Image (cartoon, helix red, strand yellow):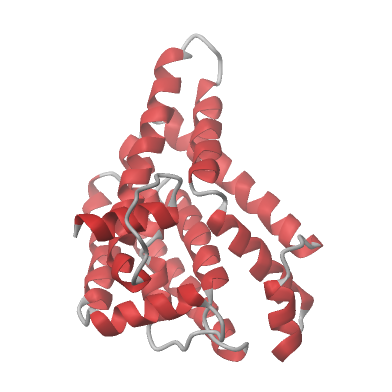
Amino acid sequence: MWAHFCQALTFLTRFSFSHAFSDPSRCVPYFVPAGLLLGFVLTVACFLVNQLFTVIAHCAFLAGFVWLVLEVWLTRALHWDGLADLADALGSGAQGERFLEILRDSRLGSFGAITLILVLLGHFLCLSLHSAAHQYGILILAPAYARAVPVLLARNAVPNHGSLLGLAVLQALDRYPTLYAGTLLFVVTLPLLLLAFVSLWQFILLLGLTWCLVRYLHKRAHENGGISGDYFGAGIVLAQLLFLFCTL
């Protein structure tokens, strides 16, 4: 279990361990715990900035910025790259092979750039507001909640040809029959535990928007050659933003 958890950390973050990726599907069940550890590290940095720079006006904005910069750096912008690629492909209006060609193109297009700017700005504003309210528990849990999305998204999906991550997540669902149920239970119960800090409508809004996001990405993948790592990356970033926004 420890080896597979280390594999998940190595894949999702810059935390590097020596364990080889002989079977990537075995580390998928540890995406959520890896996200929880990532959230803890990011929030410690955010807390320290809040404590050290209290004399600076609006230091919450600085703390939120530090959280976001560290998140992008520690994850090697892995998920953000997927968001940009998918935004370019969807924004182009292309279908079939042309869609997949744009999706696999590493160059940044206008749709990807605009999407990145808007989503980064949304993260920055939400993180700053949570930091100002000292809601550090929310900041810790956001990355863990978001990293449940790949498992939910892969349910009843087919892998895109050549997508190793898409295949790995689907193999994990076959290998661990209870993985989907456990992830779904986590997604539902985590906001429920937050009811002491958020209102009922926020809880309902978060689950509803998460469901809409998963359904939308699943539909687009089904129409355009199957699921791939870009869909998972986009789902993680957008679900993280939804969590931060709905818990304000």
- Tell me the quarter of the image containing the N terminus: bottom left
Q: Is residue 130 left or right of residue 18?
A: right
Foreground residue, 81 or 6?
6
Foreground residue, 28 or 248?
28
Q: Please say if 49 is above or below 138.
A: above
Residue 86 appears anywhere in the view: yes
Residue at 65% x, 70% y is: 86
Q: Looking at the picture, how far across and down is residue 130, in whole percent?
A: 43, 37
Foreground residue, 239 or 229?
229
- The tally of labels here is 0
Residue at 55% x, 64% y is: 234
The residue furthest top is 55
The residue furthest right is 110
Residue at 50% x, 26% y is: 60
- Tell me the quarter of the image containing the C terminus: top left
Q: Looking at the picture, how far across and down is residue 90, in whole percent?
A: 70, 75
Q: Looking at the picture, how far across and down is residue 72, in whole percent?
A: 54, 45
Foreground residue, 5 or 130?
5
Residue 200 appears anywhere in the view: no
Residue at 74% x, 75% y is: 102
Q: Please say if 159 is above or below 143.
A: below
Q: Is residue 66 left or right of residue 184?
A: right
Q: Looking at the picture, how far across and down is residue 70, in whole percent?
A: 50, 37
Q: Is residue 8 left or right of residue 121?
A: left
